[in-house]
Each structure stands twice: as structure tokens, then as C-alpha cells.
Image (spheres, grey):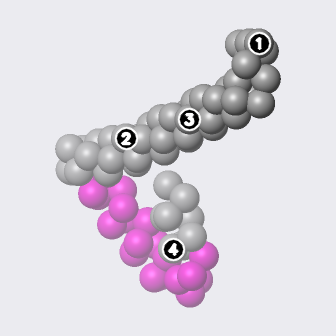
Amino acid sequence: MQLLIQLMHQIPAGWPRWTILIATAVVYFLFPGLVNKITRNRLENQLVTEITQYLQMKKLFFEVEALKKEKDPGFSFPG
């Protein structure tokens, strides 16, 4: 949807905008599988990004814990 809005702002006003809008509506209603595939890919990419960020944070926590244990062996890292 964001891509469509950006595209609409770049197209000159008048009939070209209406043509793109009508073409988008036709694709949306006649090819719902294509729309679902595009939406699903975007959601999967977002999920992969969130999982990657989570794993990077876990890695950092483990590194901090290892450094603290190395510095003070009697210290236990909370959490």
C-alpha cells in the first residue's frame, strides 16, 4: 500500500493517476493470490528481521555475561 501511495505521488495528476488506481484495483480483485503472495513475503521478511534482532541481543547478553564472569568469577549475571 505504501508503495502504491508513493507511486501515485510521482505520477502526474489527471488520467494517469486514475489509470494506475484502476489497474491496481483490477489486479487486487482479479488476482487475490498475487496480492496474498506479496503481503506474505513482506510479513515473512519482517519476521526474519525481528528474529535476527532478537538473536543478536541474546548473543550480546551472553558476551556480557562471559565478560563479567571473566572479570569477577563470583558474580552471577541477573536475568
**On screen, 40 above or below 70?**
below
- The residue identified by callout 2 is 44
- The residue identified by callout 4 is 7
Helix, strand or loop: magenta stretch: helix
Front-most of residues 29 and 32: 32
Instruction: Answer few, some or many: residues within 10 Å of disc 2's Cα (few below 14, many 20 plus, some between 14 and 19).
Output: few
State how far apart marks 2 and 1 are (Cα): 43 Å
- The residue identified by callout 3 is 59
Between label 2 and label 4, give the one nearer the viewer.
2
**Between discs 1 and 3, the one toward the N terminus:** 3
State how far apart marks 2 and 3 are (Cα): 22 Å
Instruction: Answer few, some or many: residues within 10 Å of disc 4's Cα (few below 14, many 20 plus, some between 14 and 19).
Output: few
User: Residue 26, which numbered label?
Assistant: none
State how far apart marks 4 and 3 are (Cα): 40 Å
Q: Quadrant of the C terminus?
A: top right
**Between discs 4 and 3, the one toward the N terminus:** 4
Name the side, left or right, on which 26 lies relative to 62. left
Magenta stretch bounds:
9-29
**On screen, 69 above or below 4?**
above
Residue 32 place in picture, x, y as percent = 24, 44
